[in-house]
Amino acid sequence: MTERAFIKTFLYVWIYIAVLSLVFYLVFNYESALSFFLGSAVSVMLMSHNYKRTTKAAQKDPESLKRVTMTNYAFRYAFYILILTIAHFSDGLDIIFTFIGFTSFKVAMLITMWVSKIHKEGDDDA
């Protein structure tokens, strides 16, 4: 995946989050929509953090990329566990919808890549 597609995902993921939060609110309830939004916001925040740290490490010290990547994964999953624990013990959050929110960045990235691929194939036909 190119860096450009990754950056485009940061723009499109918010549309995806807004639409699904509204759908979850209308179909399920406020608690489900809020839980999904929390998981999604955490996912986007952590992906942004990982992207910035990895980019900085690649520019300053490319040999430290493996260590930075491992640290990023450990931090991200520890934070996911913390948020899921909070959602589980909170009366106003749903752990399942929070977990579904965690997948929002990856789903938006797949949609972005799929749309970009279709768009490129359309350009080749012209």
Image (spheres, grey):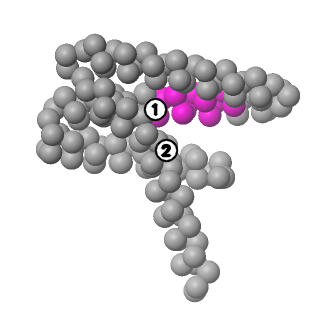
Magenta segment, prevailing SS (helix, strand or loop): helix
Residue type highlighted by circle 1? Ser
Q: Is residue 38 above or below residue 114?
A: above
Q: Position of residue 69 (x, y in %)?
A: 69, 28
Left or right: residue 34 compared with residue 101: left
Q: Is residue 21 above or below residue 65?
A: below
Q: Earlier in the sequence, mark 1 or mark 2?
A: 1
From mark 1 to mark 2, how far is it between C-alphas? 9 Å
Q: Position of residue 73 (x, y in %)?
A: 61, 26
Q: Which mark is residue 43?
A: 1
Is residue 55 inside the magenta stretch?
no
Instruction: Residue 94: name its quadrant.
Output: top left
Stretch of the chain drawn in magenta: 44-54
Q: Position of residue 56 (x, y in %)?
A: 72, 29
| Label 2 secondary element | helix
Q: Is residue 116 above or below residue 92?
A: below
Is residue 46 inside the magenta stretch?
yes
Q: Position of residue 116 (x, y in %)?
A: 54, 64
- Name the residue: 58% across, 47% down: 6
Q: Which mark is residue 106?
A: 2
Asked if one can make out residue 81 in the rendered structure from this viewpoint, the answer is yes
Labelled pair 1, 2 in contact (Cβ < 8 Å): yes
